[in-house]
Structures are given as structure tokens and as C-alpha cells.
Image: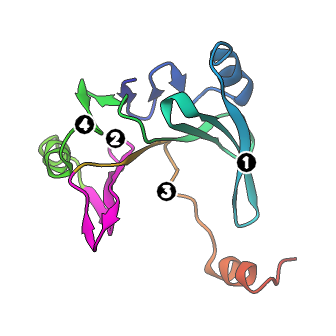
Amino acid sequence: MEILPYIGLGDYLFSDDFKTIELKLKNIDFEIGERLFMDFKCKTIFIEKYGLLITFKEDNYSVDCFEITEPIVTYKGISILHNDFEFLKKLLVNEGNQLIENIDGFRSDKVGIGVYCDLKKGELTKRPTSIIIYSKGHYDEKIDLDDIIKYYLNDRK
């Protein structure tokens, strides 16, 4: 499956609603679930065969992100999970991407891709173990700090 920045992953598009994705999966086994972030519930579809979790936006009218752990994903023809983590960083930087790094990986908002490794004995694994392909606005969500504090203090109204 080819990553199409801010368009989708292979045949699965960010503009697809829940029913459309279900129809595209008519011959593939999948599980329906939900993901909870604070008070937001989002439907999910998990396709074990691909190690693919599709998370929908709260309204279920479009896809928020694709998270994948199986080596079937390519970007410009290059297998993401079959390549060295440092090679992938250089590839994206050489394309003019500014990377946002954290403890277990990096993401590029220019192409909407996050690449992550496992931490073993305090070191990152040589190859990535998961990828997130995200929609525009995925990291732009503005959540008020007061709301987060109230949520964790169970002071929801």
C-alpha cells in the first residue's frame, strides 16, 4: 500500500466515511472498535491481516489516521518498515521535510507521516515498528489545558 500524503493509504482515503471503508473491506476480515481520548470517542476498524488500524474523526465522516505495523507500506516506492530508521530520516529531510522528533521516532507534517521504533534497553530499534499516516489537522487539535486538568481530576461538566 502506497502512502499518498494527505490523501490516504492505497485505496483507503482520508475523505472516506465509515460506511465507505466498510464497503471497501467487504472481502477482508476486520474488527470494529473505538478509541477514547479524553471525552472523545472515535470509531476504529482493525484489519489484522495488514496490522492496520483506521481511526475515524469523531463524526465518522472521514478518516483521522492510519496506523500500521506490517511491512506492506511504501512511500515513493520505498518500504518503510523494511528500511533503517536513520535512512528514512535522511530521505525525508533530503526532500525538504522538517522533522518533529520525540523519544521513539519522528513525524513530518509536510507529508503527514510518523515513523516510530521500539525502545529496547534504552535504545531505539534499528528499523521502525510502526507508522502513522495522518490527516490534515490531526496534530492541530487545540485542547485547552484547563480541560485536560479537569478531565484528569474528574471535574467534567
Amino acid type of the residue that numbered disc 4 sits on in the rendered structure: His
Residue at the image position 75 percent from the left and 53 percent from the top: 41
Contact between labelled residues 1 and 2, with CB atoms less than 8 Å apart: no
In which quadrant of the rendered image does the N terminus lie?
Answer: top left
Q: Is residue 109 magenta?
A: yes
Q: How many marks?
A: 4
Q: Nearer the viewer, mark 2 or mark 1?
A: 1
What whole-number distance in Å separates the C-alpha atoms at marks 4 and 1?
29 Å
- Which dot marks residue 34? 1
Amino acid type at image mark 3: Tyr
Closer to the chain start, of discs 2 and 3, is 2
Q: Position of residue 46 (x, y in %)?
A: 62, 36
- Kindly identify which residue carries mark 4: 82
Compare marks 3 and 1 and give the one earlier in the sequence: 1
Towards the viewer: 89 or 6: 89
How far apart in space, not on screen, are marks 4 and 3 (Cα)? 26 Å
| Left or right of 46, for residue 131 | left
Specify whether residue 152 is painted magenta.
no
Residue behind mark 3:
139
Quarter holding residue 117? bottom left
Please name the residue shown 37% across and 28% down the image: 72
Q: Nearer the viewer, mark 3 or mark 1?
A: 1
Q: Start and end of the magenta stretch? A: 99-126
Q: Amino acid at mark 2?
A: Val
Measure the C-alpha gap from mark 4 to mark 2: 19 Å
Q: Are marks 4 and 2 in contact (CB under 8 Å)?
A: no
Q: Along the line of sight, which residue is nearer the eye, 65 or 157?
A: 65
Q: Within 10 angstroms of label 3, few (less than 14), some, or many (20 or more) residues?
A: few
| Disc 2 target residue | 111
Q: Quadrant of residue 132?
A: top left
The crowd level at tag 1 (other Cα within 10 Å; few <14, some 14-19, many 20+) is some
Where disc 1 sits, the SS reads strand
